[in-house]
Image: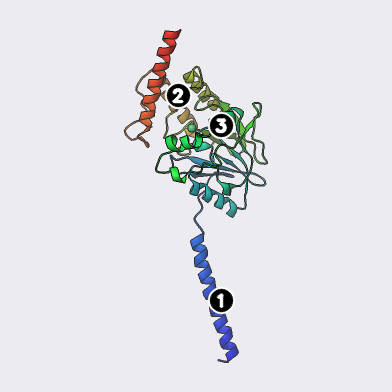
Amino acid sequence: MTLVELVFVYGVYYREILRSRQAVANDKRKEPPVLRQVAEGVLIHESEFCQSNAVVVQGRAGVLLIDPGVLGPEMAAVADDLRELGQPVVAGFSTHPHWDHLLWHARLGAAPRYGTARCAATGRDQLADPRAKARIAERLIPPDIAGQVPLDLLGLITGLAGETRQIPWDGPEVRIVEHQAHAPGHAALLIEERGVLVAGDMLSDVLIPMLDLNGTADPIKDYLAALRLLEGVAEGVDVLIPGHGSTGGADQVRARIGQDRAYVHALRDAQVPSDPRVGPSATYDWVLGVHARQLQQLAQRSERDGTSG
Ligand SMILES: [Zn+2]
């Protein structure tokens, strides 16, 4: 072998070594995708925290991100997936003003974030107190994840005027179905073109209906009205995405509306609900405590109304 041949062969060999090293490095850097497609152009990420679902809807120039997630590393992983797909976040939406639906991560970018007018106003009121974030961190976020929840961009949403029927963005029509049930200004979102209903904190298979017991005169009546409203838009829905829990198919929409209605009836009548979400095989044992608290608060309310009226 001549010197020239030797240099050439060694050169090829050396390039191969470099390439394989690079491949190993790339392999290490590349995490598996966290987003999972549930309908055409609709992907979700389920958080380790309370099975919270972040929802991505693909539009023409980027995606709409609904309830982005809870843990910082998880939201960053969603941002990485979207970067990989070449799809920037062009709009955000929070279904309701509870901390676990109002979060954001810097890596998701600076797209406008929306909520209903009542949702935004409630969030703004809560966060007006300079100690609000510290209180959320102390009292609402479980201690084991508190360090992983980035609160700096919490609640920075713009309220959509009351008559706004759809999210203003360049993508499939996303209809806002606002109702009074779980929280002020709570909205479900209907993406008719994709057969998807994003239910916010309604219609979960792991959490019972949690009523907004402070902001309304008749929370039971409001919740039942909200379920009727969802029933009215359920026709043609193939995929149901709850704020927490598993996604469901067409049959699950009516099944879960029925299950939530039965629970609310049991709560109203102070009966023991026959509901798997608070039964012996419940996913979260603390949900039984939520049920007991709701029962107690409703009893106090009716006692108070009884004596005052
Ligand atoms: Zn909630």
Query: Does residue 247 appear anywhere in the picture?
Result: yes
Residue at point 42% right, 20% down? 265
Label tally: 3
Q: Residue at x 67, y 47 (%)?
A: 61
Q: Is residue 242 visible?
A: no
Q: Is mark 3 within 8 Å of ligand 1?
A: no
CB within 8 Å, label 2 to label 3? no
| Residue identifier under label 3 | 128
Q: Name the front one of labels 2 and 3.
A: 3
Circle nearer the N terminus (2, 3): 3
Type of residue at label 3? Ala
Residue that protrudes farthest toward the bottom in the picture: 2
Q: Is residue 10 left or right of residue 255?
A: right
> Could you tell which of marks 1 and 3 lies nearer the N-terminus?
1
Is 164 placed left or right of 247 in the picture? right
Decide: is 69 above or below 264.
Answer: below
Badge 3 density bin: few <14, some 14–19, many ≥20, Cα 10 Å: few
Residue 261: mark: 2
Which residue position holds label 1? 15
Q: CA distance from mark 1 to mark 3?
A: 59 Å
Up-down relation of residue 111 to residue 24 (above or below):
above
Can you tell which of label 1 and label 3 is closer to the viewer? 3
The residue carrying pointer 2 sits among few (fewer than 14), some (14 to 19) or many (20 or more) residues within 10 Å by Cα, namely many
Q: Residue furthest left?
A: 280
Q: Amino acid at mark 1?
A: Arg
User: Residue 104 lies in what quarter of the image?
Assistant: top right
C-alpha distance separating marks 2 and 1 = 66 Å
Colour mapping: rainbow
- Dot 2 amino acid type: Arg
Residue 103: % across, % down? 53, 40
Q: CA distance from mark 2 to mark 3?
A: 35 Å
Q: Is mark 2 within 8 Å of ligand 1?
A: no
